[in-house]
Image (spheres, grey):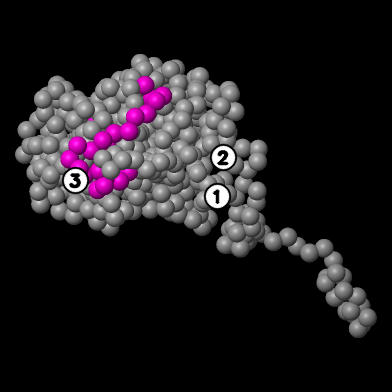
Amino acid sequence: MNDRDVEERLHSVVKGEQPRAPQSLRSFLRGLPEAQTQRRRGPLAWLRTLVDGVPGSAHRSLLIGRTQLGLGVAAAVVVGLVAGGALLSFRQTTGPAAPTRTGTPTPMQTPQRSGQAKSSPIVASLGIPNLEWIGVPALNKDNMTLPTQVIPLAGGKYLGITASPYGLNGLVRSADGLYWDWSSPADVNAGAAVLTSIASDGVGTIILSGAAQGVDGTLDGRIYVSRDGNSWQEIADESIFRGVTLRTAVYGTGGFVVLGWNEASPADSLRQVAEWRSDDGRSWTRVTTPIKGTSALIVPTQGGFLLSGTPLAAGRIDEPPMWFSTDGRTWARARAIDNTAQKMGPLLSATVTRMSSVYAVSMGADGVSRELVLSKDGGMTWRLVKRNDSTPYASSINQITSLSTSDMEYIFVTVTMGEAASLYVSTDGGTNWVMAKDHKVGGPTGTALLQIGTGSQAGATRILAVGKPGTGLGVWLGSLSIAP
């Protein structure tokens, strides 16, 4: 072969058709961070970030360190996307802000099915008469999704919602209250972007509040209704919610109430919290509220509803930021009966007992500390709880719940210090407290308290104490061994 032939052969190799890279190399290159960054720049990137990082229903805390959702039918608390894991900020449990998505979900964001091998529940011995706790101190899968708000279903089953940091936003189901199965918001409705709260009338109507992607790139409020928790109907009249994301839902005194607000409005705008009411969960009417901002707490009581938040207008010196209503339509300002209204800020978490008492955690006047407050008449008049020094780190209390009978009240609070969390119980109205923990088995404990009630009746039948996945705090179910 002469020099010319060699040169022509080289040109044919260089300029000819090039071989394709193997599929394994192509997949590897697509998975590089640069490629993921490009993917997140698409028109739905904001929606992916919201759905993957949304915290949780119900309420101010989990907000929610704010994750506040004491989430539950008896107390729906919300705190705009600050709810440490409580969806779209629950004002009942404070918690961390939604994490930024970085491509691969972290372990605690990965939902797991409860079909995994299960450990036998452990019974915690607390030495407190009539109080029973069972639980799983260390889950076989520490990244198993856990609930942030729960309602009971027929047959002893449970249905709830979850949000970061307790799992990817969606529905959760359980046959025992300890192990939970997860399903996507899309399983409720193909258009659902986020689920924020759940409520039930206890006789066949369940509603989910949330939002779907609007035509202008916003999140528009949605209500989904079901009779069994399996098949869901979207409320047809989308215009009724006027583009407002619905944040929390409750049922009481014959009707459903939902609250909503948009967090994207200008910082100097009024941001009045919106409210809608419904007798059947399907037809909704707009109601005016006396509060503003991006957080609120609403709780059904035996005689109506309790509402708390930032007032639209300053009240008198004896008026704390709480209101009560017999029907959820008109609101009257509550009073403090011991000249301590100036020490009471908006409520972060609240619980109602069968003796009509309302115990709550209030933000202190300094905006950092916490106060325990009490109303004996369903939220109309309030006073500070004079507790002693048996509650360590009282300023770190973020959630409260209760189990009660017609003549006995067991009040629980969770005290969170970093990743550690302790559960305390009082049987004398909040004066004396003891740690509710069996040191031999390591529980109960948890960063969130979930009250499981029945319809609008005050008083929970059970409560859940759950810890964020990865903390080793597990999940615990508490109940009374005597009839309520």
Does residue 150 appear left or right of residue 132 in this picture? Answer: right
Asked if 122 appears above or below 326 in the picture, the reply is: below
Tell which circle, 3 or 2, labels the residue nearer the N-terminal end.
2
Mark 2: secondary structure:
strand
Q: Which mark is residue 445?
A: none
What residue lies at 31% left-to-right and 40% top-to-bottom?
316
Q: Which residue is mark 2?
A: 219
Does residue 289 appear left or right of residue 407 in this picture? Answer: right
Evaluate if marks 1 and 2 touch, with contact meaning CB atoms under 8 Å apart: no
Amino acid type, callout 3:
Leu
Quadrant in which residue 181 is drawn = top left
Mark 1: secondary structure:
loop
Q: Quadrant of the C terminus?
A: top left
What residue lies at 25% left-to-right and 53% top-to-bottom?
369
Out of 470 and 380, give the one closest to the viewer.
Answer: 380
Asked if 244 appears above or below 302 in the picture, the reply is: below
Instruction: Look at discs 3 and 2 and give the one toward the viewer.
Output: 2
Quadrant in which residue 86 is drawn = top left
Indicate yes or no whether the magenta region holds residue 341. Answer: yes
Amino acid type, callout 1:
Pro
Tell which circle, 1 or 2, labels the residue nearer the N-terminal end.
2
Does residue 129 appear left or right of residue 232 in this picture? Answer: left
Quadrant in which residue 466 is drawn = top left
Q: Which residue is mark 1?
A: 266
Q: Give the spatial CA distance, label 1 vs label 2.
A: 16 Å
The residue lying furthest to the front in this view is: 316
What residue lies at 45% left-to-right and 54% top-to-bottom?
99
Instruction: Give neighbour class at mark 1: few <14, some 14-19, many 20+ (Cα, 10 Å).
Output: few
Question: Magenta segment, which residues?
Answer: 327-352
Q: Which residue is mark 3?
A: 423
